[in-house]
Image (cartoon, rainbow, N blue to C red):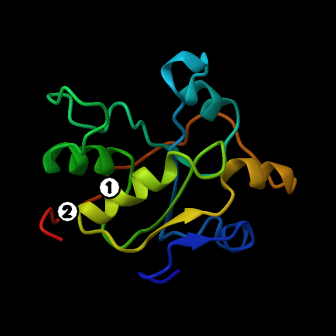
């Protein structure tokens, strides 16, 4: 995956699962009136090794507008807690194909991280191809993450 790559294929991701420098993030989000819980869906089945990126939490809680970019300190602390650090390549996906994942891709770019891509077709395509899923949340270790808001 290069810095200029916006999308990665399910074949690419399947070939790189388990790579120590790769972080996979499930950025699924649903409209409030949908009756769906993206975290519960993540726990019930996600791409192996994926961590849940909570768009509602990782936003500016002081803004009257929904899902505004968080303060840099908040983004750094959440990435560290999720085990996303400097030197990691990041692949973001969502459950519907390409709905909320581009928002998270943009947020990483906003904070200066360029080695990030969206999974083409998302979890829907991954499942349709019969690829493996895992349940529950992985054990995470803090990592050092450096953000540059002026990027």
**Side of 64 relative to 121 (left or right):** left
- Residue at disc 2, secondary structure: loop
Position in image of residue 19 (x %, y %) = 58, 70
| Residue drawn 56% across the image and 36% down it | 137
Kindly identify the residue that appears in the image at 50 percent across and 79 percent down.
5
Left or right, residue 26 beside residue 96: left
The image quarter in which residue 28 lies: top right
Q: Position of residue 93 (x, y in %)?
A: 57, 53
Q: Is 9 rendered above or below residue 78? A: below
User: Dot 1 surroundings within 10 Å: few (below 14), some, or many (20 or more)?
Assistant: some
Res 140 quadrant in image? top left
From the viewer's perspective, tell me whether residue 120 is left or right of residue 133: left
Q: Which residue is mark 2?
A: 147
* Along the line of sight, the residue nearer the viewer: 78 or 55: 55
Q: Residue at the spot x=21%, y=36% of the render?
A: 60
In terms of sequence position, does the residue under pointer 1 or pointer 2 come before the other?
Answer: 1
Camera sees residue 85: no
Q: Quadrant of the C terminus?
A: bottom left
Quarter residue 107 falls in: bottom left
Query: Does residue 129 appear in the picture of this structure?
Result: yes
Left or right: 138 with respect to 116? right
In front: label 1 or label 2: 1
| Residue for point 61% across, 35% down | 42
Does 151 appear above or below 106?
below
Q: Secondary structure at mark 1?
A: helix
Residue 47's x, y, as percent?
67, 50
Residue 24 position within the rendered picture, expressed as x and y whole percent measured from the top left:
53, 57
The residue beneath circle 1 is 107
Contact flag, marks 1 and 2 (Cβ < 8 Å)? no
* Residue 28, above or below 63: below
Crowdedness near tag 2: few (<14), some (14–19) or many (≥20) residues, C-alpha within 10 Å: some
Which of the labelled discs sits on residue 16, or is there none?
Answer: none
């Amino acid at each position: 995956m290069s810095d200029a790559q916006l999308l990665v294929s399910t074949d690419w991701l399947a070939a790189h699962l388990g790579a120590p420098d790769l972080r996979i993030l499930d950025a699924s989000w649903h409209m409030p009136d949908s009756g769906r819980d993206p975290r519960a869906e993540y726990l019930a089945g996600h791409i192996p090794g994926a961590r849940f990126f909570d768009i509602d939490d990782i936003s500016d809680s002081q803004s009257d507008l929904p899902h505004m970019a968080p303060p840099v300190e908040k983004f750094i602390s959440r990435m560290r807690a999720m085990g996303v650090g400097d030197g990691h390549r990041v692949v973001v996906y969502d459950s519907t194909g390409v709905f909320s994942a581009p928002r998270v891709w943009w947020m990483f770019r906003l904070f200066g991280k360029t080695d990030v891509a969206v999974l083409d077709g998302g979890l829907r395509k991954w499942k349709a191809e019969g690829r493996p899923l895992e349940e529950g949340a992985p054990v995470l270790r803090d990592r050092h993450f450096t953000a540059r808001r002026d990027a």
